[in-house]
Each structure stands twice: as C-alpha cells, then as structure tokens.
Amino acid sequence: MNNLFDFAEACLHQADIETKLALTAEAWQLYQQGDLQFEAISPPKDISCVVFPARPELLAPRFMKRRKLGTPEGVQAFYHSLAHIEFVAIYLAWDILYRFRGLPVAFYQDWLQVAQEEAIHFHLIRTHLRQLGMDYGDLPAHQGLWEHAQETAEDVLARLVMIPRCMEARGLDVTPGMIDKIRSLNDEDGVAILTRILNDEQQHVQFGSKWFNYQCRLQQLDPDAAFKSMILKYFKNAKPKGPFNTEMRLQAGFTSNELAWLASP
Ligand SMILES: [Fe+2]
Ligand SMILES: [Fe+2]
C-alpha cells in the first residue's frame, strides 16, 4: 500500500488499535521518504461505515461516573478520558483528509501530520495509563466526540470550524490548568506528556485556521461572519464555553474579532 487514501480507508474501517497505530506510522514513514501517493482513485465511503473498537463502551456524558483527581481511581479515569480523546482524534484527522477531496496536496500533508501526532499522543497516554494499572477500554468513554464529525461530513468549512477550531481549540484552553493539577500530584511523566500534547495541539488548531481561511477565500465568505454562523448553527444558537486561552488561540490563527465574539456574553 502506498496511497494516502488507501491508508485512510484502512484506518477508518477496522477496529484493531495496534493495526491502526501501525498503519498511521507506516503512512507517515512513506511520506517522509517521498513514497506516498496523494491521488485518490475511488470516492470515500459514507461516514456511517467508520468502525470503532468494541471497547471502550461509549456512553452519553450524563451516564458517566464523575471522579475527582484526588484518588488513584480518579487519576486513572482522568487519563482514560484523555486516551479516548486522543484515540478519537486519530479518527478525526484521518477522516478530514479521507472525506474531503480535490484540495491542495498541502491540506492532505497537514492532516496526515496531525494523524501521526494524535497516534503518538494516544500511545503516550495509554502507556502512562498502563503504568497506573489500567488499559484503554477498561472504563466507558464519552460518545459525543465523534458526533461533530458525523454532523459535518458533507461540509469541509463546518468540519474545520467544529473540530480543529472548536474541539481542539478547547484543548488549548483547558490543558494548562490540567498540567498544573497533575504537577501538584508530582506526576512528572504526566506533566511532560501533556506539555508535549499542548504544543502539538496549537499547530493542529493553526492548520484548522489556515484551511478555514483558505475555504473562506475559495467560497468568497467573510471569515468572521462564517465562523459565527457555523458556531451558532452547530451549537444551536449557543457558543463554546470559556474561559479562552487568548494567547495560544491568537498564535493558532484566531482573530481578535473571533475571540472578542466568543468571549462576549
Ligand atoms: Fe492530540
Ligand atoms: Fe489534535
């Protein structure tokens, strides 16, 4: 296999975690060697064909037990939920490049880099979780993360707003506080992993901003207006919750207009 879209199709349509990580690493390796093809031969399958593993069990957030970080079980649950976020992020990166065709090669290269980094994030968190005596899949996980992908399967502009510029941008807001908390637990490995993830995620959001602006130019849309209308549509007239990490979001390509609007009541 040496075609990007064949790798994407394989990663999205089989559930085995190790195979998915190996395929992602192999695609990245081929790309680094200049041996990866970027010409799509067949159209994408419907998003309903994407396959997730049997475990973890996916539940609505209201059915998930809340645990505080102050207990060993709470720390395990914290890393389990992070592992799930990173695991779904692998799918999200493969899905955006699989589903939306006819874009510049740089679009596919950027999201392949994201897929590869999400696979590393997942691996780092899972290894840490195993050292704490638990594996990914041992607890139920949040079912909502994939829903925004399903809702935006037909619209690349909406996908760019909802995934990199909402979900991943939220990571920039909340991760510094998480790092402080786990530092207070003397979990230095955890601090190192989360710091690395935070740095990588800033670039993922920046890729989102870059391709969002590209799409706006292509569709002759005003970016501020397009951002607002997409958020209001998918948040059903609400907005993402703050507080927002203004500094990191600005570096990741948010405009001061967008940030002022997000922070306004
Ligand atoms: Fe990540
Ligand atoms: Fe990410």
Image (tube, rainbow, N blue to C red):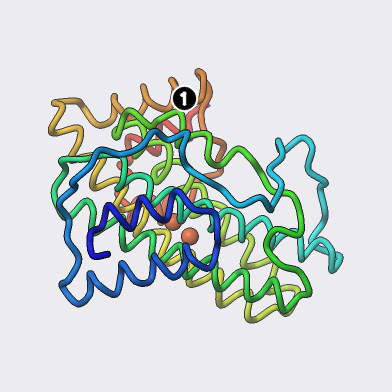
Relative placement, left or right, of 213 versus 239 is left
Give the labeled residue for mark 1. 234
Who's the residue at 60% across and 52% down the image? 53
The percent position of residue 246, horizontal first and vertical second, equals: 43, 49
Kind of residue indicated by mark 1 = Tyr
Secondary structure of the residue carrying tag 1 is helix
Residue ID at (48%, 34%): 148
Crowdedness of circle 1 by 10 Å Cα count: few (<14), some, many (20+)?
A: some
- Looking at the picture, does residue 14 appear above or below residue 30? above
The residue lying at 52 percent from left, 71 percent from top is: 195
Q: Position of residue 137 (x, y in %)?
A: 70, 58
| Residue 61 vertical position relative to residue 139 in the rendered view, above or below | above
Q: Quadrant of residue 202?
A: bottom left
Kindly tell me whether mark 1's CB lies below 8 Å from ligand 2: no
Closest to the observer, 94 or 164? 94
Instruction: Pick the residue in front: 201 or 154.
Output: 154
Q: Is residue 236 left or right of residue 260?
A: right
Residue 188 drawn at (x, y percent): 65, 81
Which residue: 22% across, 74% down?
32
